[in-house]
Amino acid sequence: MKKHLFLSGEKNNNFITKAPALALAFLLFSVITNAQVFTGPGGAIQNNGIDTYYSVVVSGLSAPLDSTYGMEEVCLNINHTAVDELYIYLQSPSGHIVQLTAGSSSTGVNYTNTCFNSQASTSVTQVTSPYTGSYRPIGNLGRFNAGQNGNGTWKLIVRDYIASPNSGTLISWNLKFGNNPPKPVTFSSSNLPIVIINTSGQPITENESVVDMGIIYNGNQRNYVTDSWNEYNGKTRINIRGNTSKNFEKKSFALELQDGLGEELSVPLLGMPTESDWFLVASYPDKTLLRNQLTYDLYREMGHYSPRTKNVEVIINNEYQGIYALLERPKRDDDRINISKVTATDNFFPAITGGYIFKIDRRDEDGWSSLMAGNSPTSSHFYYQFVYPQDTAITPPQKAYIKDFMDSMETTMNSSYFANTTNGYSKYIKTSSFIDYFIISELSKNIDGYRLSTYLYKENISHGGKLNIGPVWDYDLAWHNCNYGNAYDPAGWEYQLPDTAYPAPTWWSRFMEDQNFKNMLACRWNELRQTLINTSYLNNYIDAAAAVLNEAQSRNFRQWPILGSYIAPNPQVQPNASYQGEVDDLKNWIAARIPWLDAAITGACPSVGVEEQLAMQPDMNGFPNPFTDNLRVSYKVPQEMISNEAAQVKVELLNVLGEPVKLVYSGSKQPGSYEELINTQHLAAGVYIVKLSVNDRVVYQKTTKAG
């Protein structure tokens, strides 16, 4: 039988003996309610972004916490002039942590007699300071009531994440255990694949640790937690990933599959291509759980690589964690970003020309600052991070090469001749990729689309050597899910957003000054409006994807009860929120966004198709390959490349350093097919490059002279 006592600090049996009637009433109330209260000490809150811990020892609970007797309520008093700086958590003796408040999800001054109860009808994010009363926390206190021992040291964790003059103090706090606790979420089976992770007592942190992982997937049949781990059964290296998202209670994780020797293990998962590196993405602020999936699938249908993803339900250390997206990591390989491999020895032309992957992002990884300032009121420069080769593998010559390439491209974009078809931006970029990236970023009005998590990759010169943008990445704050930067408004351009900390490149403004770019944009937009960017098509996609999640979302939002809570930076109206309401909000916003873009994207479609105009290259073939003394080069000058004058053609042979060793032809040519004979008797055996220039179009072919 559980003890029926009110407790303050340590167990307290000192009932008021001078008032027998009151003492008797007090005793009867405690017997009826089974309530036990423990009060912890207060103190100053560190004002440096580091957690401050306040501990209380709980004793006298006679059984594990469960749905009949467990954690009911946490009450506290905090003096602070800006509570939007505070993240507040409660940690149990077993190490489970539940979030009470989440920084900017609350505003104002002080928490005064504020109680957190998961069965309260109103979220703490829906009211204003001083938050007096009983409110639903952001997290679920029922997570403590799943059979764990409540006796031991409980900790209130307060983090003032902004180092500023706004400091504060925890005045008091207490825990209440009773016989009306919120219930934990039970989970036994799913229509989604199930991922199970056992850490053997290790905490999952930002540092990597090795754990056991299994995946249950029975195809079209239902998946049970008791089924065998039939899709994957082995070790994985795991760590918390993300920047802002690492502050959310539901964490995202990076995974690296491993074999028995601790080496990377590449396997296909859930029908996705073989790989060792994966992400488990929580998409915590996206209450539809669909925004990333919608973006990735739509961009793939537009003809580009984007990460494949599968929805799963996750268990960690026997605790249900909700819906996650198992997601490919953007990488260089034949099934993902298919560019040439670069090794540490590829430091000379043409191998040094690529491929490369890098991204515009924060300054927390190795990289370099842009040559030109971005779209910033203070002339701030955005930042490129190395992705492939990794910052630990890329050589100094390779760093210098890709930086010089981007410096040249940025200089051109900032020049008076940026739109010139020979020496302008089309010399450096694959314009069609930038047009499609612009369309997806503006359609979704992604607040981070141009300035953070923005991938770019450069092809090797043997494949054209052009810069592409993509794949798309991290769109959980897009599609009407952000309340700043005008991202919530279905009207307006997102590329015009000025930002000091993370500015976007000014390329986009320059592109929109070029009528040729605007014409190609209009042509592509109108093409997509007939198929993928059609309201009916998008609504059907969203409804179908939401139907797949409908069963699991109910469990997810019991474990993470944020429906109806404001999770920064949500813009939606929160009271009486439901999953279907969140899905409808997404569809309604898209229905308003598309007409604005219809009116804003103007231009005349070019006389030839967009891709034909942008990717047009003269044909060339050098043969035989390998050759001995004579090399023949056949090539074609397309009619479409010539307006009123003959094309200017140059055929050259280069060495591996990119230096000309023989000029084969230089002059004008009419449309047609041609062949040049190159006598190479005076050249040593080795690798050579044939370079063909037709007006502003250049193609290369690597060839070998045999010994």
Image: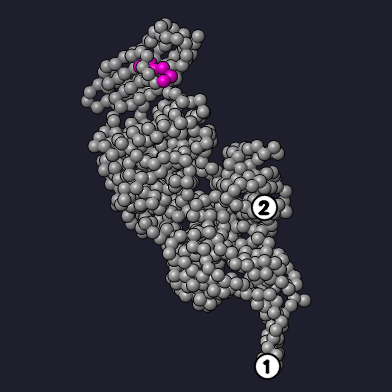
Of badges 2 and 1, nearer the viewer stands 1
Identify which amino acid the numbered label 1 is placed on. Ala
* Place of residue 302 in the rendered image (x, y in percent of width and height, measured from the top left): 43, 42
The residues colored magenta run 652-657
Neighbor class of circle 2 (other Cα within 10 Å; few <14, some 14-19, many 20+) is: few
Is residue 656 covered in magenta?
yes
Residue at 22% x, 23% y is: 645
- Residues under numbered marks 2 and 1 in contact, where contact means CB atoms less than 8 Å apart: no
Count of numbered circles on the image: 2
Name the residue nearer the viewer: 315 or 108.
108
Whether residue 330 is situated above or below residue 347 in the rendered picture = below
CA gap between label 2 and label 1 equals 51 Å
Quarter of the rendering occupied by the N terminus: bottom right
Name the residue nearer the viewer: 606 or 52.
52
Whether residue 286 is situated above or below residue 705 in the rendered picture = below
Report which quarter residue 201 is drawn in.
Answer: bottom right
Residue at 30% x, 38% y is: 413
Identify the residue at the far right of this view.
1
Name the residue nearer the viewer: 134 or 472.
134
Residue at 38% x, 51% y is: 501
Report which quarter residue 93 is drawn in.
Answer: bottom right
Residue to which mark 2 is pinned: 202
Q: Which mark is residue 559?
A: none
Residue to which mark 1 is pinned: 19
